[in-house]
Image (cartoon, grey):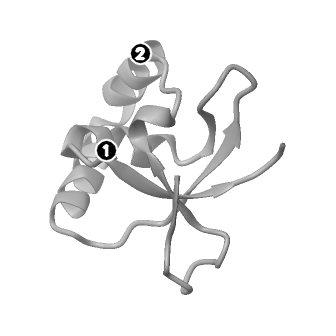
């Protein structure tokens, strides 16, 4: 995990590898079925380098992070081939 130098969202924002975020396959499939248009718009924004709101993650006792807020953004980032997302880590 790397710390971001950005101060506009929050100094507690960190960069988290998408590989460290738990995204169950069923959740991803459900979101793509239900909200594909929204996710595709976000994917295009990520590919164009536009800013996205950070996601909120919670550490998982088994490792990695669970998504508290930002499921659509995580799926869009994965589809865009991104490596990292800006996140706020909450909880223990």
Q: Secondary structure at mark 1?
A: helix
Q: Quadrant of the C terminus?
A: top right
Q: Which residue is mark 2?
A: 25
x%, y% of residue 70?
53, 48
Image quadrant assignment for residue 66: top right
x%, y% of residue 82?
26, 48
**48, above or below 32, in the image:** below
Residue at the far top: name it.
Answer: 26
Q: Earlier in the sequence, mark 2 or mark 1?
A: 2
Identify which residue is drawn at 43% across, 45% down.
Answer: 17
Give the camera-side residue of 21 and 50: 21
**51, above or below 65, in the image:** below
Left or right of 63? Residue 48 is: left
What distance separates the C-alpha of mark 2 from that of mark 1?
A: 14 Å
**66, above or below 91, in the image:** above
Marks 2 & 1, CB-CB < 8 Å contact: no
How crowded pointer 2 is (Cα within 10 Å; few <14, some 14-19, many 20+) is rated as few
x%, y% of residue 73?
41, 49
How crowded pointer 1 is (Cα within 10 Å; few <14, some 14-19, many 20+) is rated as many
Residue at the far right: name it.
Answer: 92
Left or right of 65? Residue 84 is: left
Q: Which residue is mark 1?
A: 76
Identify which residue is drawn at 57% across, 78% down.
Answer: 9
């Amino acid at each position: 995990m790397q710390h971001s130098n950005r101060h506009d969202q929050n100094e507690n924002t960190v960069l988290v590898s998408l590989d460290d975020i738990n995204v169950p396959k069923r959740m991803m499939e459900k979101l793509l079925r239900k909200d594909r248009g929204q996710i595709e718009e976000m994917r295009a924004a990520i590919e164009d380098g536009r800013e996205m709101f950070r996601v909120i993650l919670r550490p998982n006792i088994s490792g990695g992070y669970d998504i508290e807020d930002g499921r659509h953004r995580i799926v869009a980032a994965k589809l865009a081939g991104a490596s990292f997302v800006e996140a706020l880590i909450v909880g223990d």
